[in-house]
Amino acid sequence: MARILPLCYRIIPTAVDEGPAGTATRNFVARDGDGGRWFVKGYPAGTDLDAERRALELGRFARRGRIPVPVVRRALDGDLIAAADGMAVSVAAFVENAETAEGGLRGDRWAAVGEVVGRLHRTLARHPAGPPRRVPGREVCDVQRARQRLERLLARLTRNRPVSGFPSWAREIAAQRLDALPAVAAMVGELPASLTVQTVHGDLASPNLLLRGQKVAALIDFRPPGHRSPAWELGRIALDPRTVLAAPDWPTGLAATIVAYRAANPELPADELLAVPRIAAGYLACSAYPLSEAVDAPDGLTAELEAYGRNRHAAMNELRDRLTEAEELLRDRLL
C-alpha cells in the first residue's frame, strides 16, 4: 500500500491504518503529508474490476446530482482503479466525523434519510442504464424462487446434521420459513399489481449510510447499475433490522422517512410508498441470508454475523406483527 499510493496517485502516505471491514474488500485509511485522509479500498484477486469501475461511476453520477457521495480520486493514468504489484485499489476522500447508520435511525435522522434517498432515486432515474419501468409486483418478492432457495438450503443443512450453534438454529429457521411461505404469499399478494424498477444504489445498507449528527454525511459502496424497486431499497435502509429492534416507534419514524422521500421524489406513486413495509417484510421472509452462510462460508461466520442473522429474523417477525399499524399510519400521512 505504501508503494502503490505514491506510484499511482502521487499520494505520499505518512500513515496507513486498517479501515472499516468490507464484505469482499480490505479497506485502509491513509494520511498524507498535508494531513488529509483517504479511504483506500483493496480488491482481492479475482475481483471483477470492470464491475467495480461501473459501481464507482454510478456513485460519480449520483454526486453530479448533488447527492453526498465522496469524491473518487483518479489514478495518474485516469483510471478509477489502479493496479500494481499484484494489488488493485480505488481511492476516495475520507468522510470525516461520521458514523454508520448501524446504530439505528432516530430523531430527525428518519426524515434526513428519506430526503436524501428520494433525491438519489430521482437522480438515478435519469441514469443511462435505462429509464424506470414497471414489473409485476410478485417479481419484487418472488415467493416461488424463495421456496426453491430455502428447500435447497434446508436439504444441505439437514445433510450436515448440525446439532448446536448457529448452523442448528439456521436449519430450524429455514424450516420455519418454508412452512410460512403460504402466508407470505398471501401477504405479498396484496402488493400493487405492478411496481416501479429503476437504477438504484444496489447496496444501501446501514454500513453504507454515513451520518453526521442528524444529517446524512455520505452514501458509499454503490453497486454496478441494475434495476430494482426503489420502494424495496427505501425499506431496506429505513427498516434495517437494527433500527426496527432498537426503535419501538419505528412506524412513526418510517412515516417521517416516507413523507420526506415523497417530497424529494414525487414521481414514485403513493401506492408503492404505502407498500414499503410490506415489501420489507416479504423480502426478509423470502431471504436465505445469512442462514446460508452456515453451509456456504462456515469459516466466515463471526459472532457479529450470527447476531445479525438472529436480528434479521426477529425484525421480520416484528414487521409482520405490526404491518397493519404501519400501513394505516402511512395511509393517514400520504392519502
Image (spheres, rainbow, N blue to C red):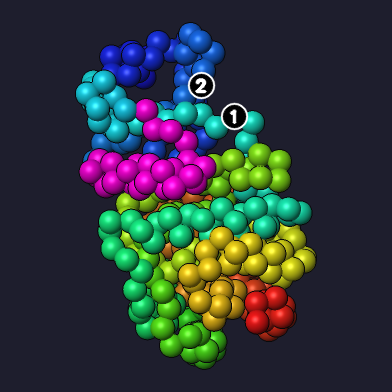
Report which residue position mark 1 lands on: 96
Residue type pointed to by label 2: Arg
Horizontal and vertical percent position of residue 36:
51, 18
Residue at left offset 23%, top offset 43%: 50
Q: Does the magenta stretch include residue 88?
A: no
Report the magenta residues as a range: 48-73
- In the rendered view, does 81 fall on the left or right side of 247? left
Q: Nearer the viewer, residue 102 or 8?
A: 8
Question: Which element carries disc 1, helix, strand or loop?
Answer: loop
* Distance Cα–Cα, label 1 vs label 2: 8 Å
Residue at left offset 37%, top offset 46%: 61
Residue 335 visible, this angle = yes
Instruction: For the C terminus, give its image quadrant.
Output: bottom right
Instruction: Tell me: residue 208, above or below residue 155.
Output: above
Report which residue position mark 2 lands on: 37
Q: Are marks 1 and 2 in contact (CB under 8 Å)?
A: yes
Residue at left offset 32%, top offset 43%: 57
Residue 99 in which image quadrant: top right
